[in-house]
Image: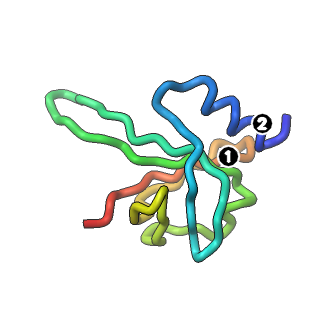
Amino acid sequence: MAIANDIKAVIAGSPFAKEAVVTWKGNPLTAVFSDYYIDAQGMESSVPHLIVADSNVSGIAHGDAVTVDGTAYTVRGLEPNGFGLTLVILELDA
């Protein structure tokens, strides 16, 4: 299955994810964005993150600036899944 189809499947399978306009290092890329709410042991938070094709973010690093639908974020974590997709954990810029 092509990576683009994998990303579309993630969007279709989740009420919490959407395709987003993402810019990294001045380049647009296709990604799934999610910022769902969690309540873990009494601590409320959201977890903004992207799911992207590895080939689209070769060289991405902690601390990189990313813009999602016009909102600025900083990369805080990278979790490649070994199947061509990477979960990019984001932090909202203040």
In this rendering, which labeled residue sits more in front, label 2 or label 1?
A: 2
Residue at left offset 58%, top offset 67%:
60
**Looking at the picture, how far across and down is residue 1, in whole percent?**
85, 34
Q: Considering the numbered disc 2 on the image, is that residue within a helix, a strand or a loop?
A: helix
Please give the label number shown on residue 5. Answer: 2
Q: Is residue 66 above or below residue 50?
A: below
Q: Amino acid at mark 2?
A: Asn
Q: Which residue is mark 1?
A: 85
Instruction: Pick out the residue farthest to the right.
Output: 1
Q: Earlier in the sequence, mark 2 or mark 1?
A: 2
Q: Amino acid at mark 1?
A: Leu
**Looking at the picture, how far across and down is residue 46, in whole percent?**
30, 41
**Looking at the picture, how far across and down is residue 6, in whole percent?**
73, 35
In the picture provided, is 4 more to the left or to the right than 76?
right
Question: Mark 1 and mark 2 in contact (Cβ < 8 Å)?
Answer: no
Q: Is residue 31 above or below residue 92?
A: above
Q: Image quarter for residue 2?
A: top right
Residue at left offset 51%, top offset 35%:
17
Residue at left offset 63%, top offset 26%:
12
Residue at left offset 36%, top offset 43%:
47
In the picture provided, is 75 more to the left or to the right than 13?
left
Q: Considering the numbered disc 1 on the image, is that residue within a helix, a strand or a loop?
A: strand
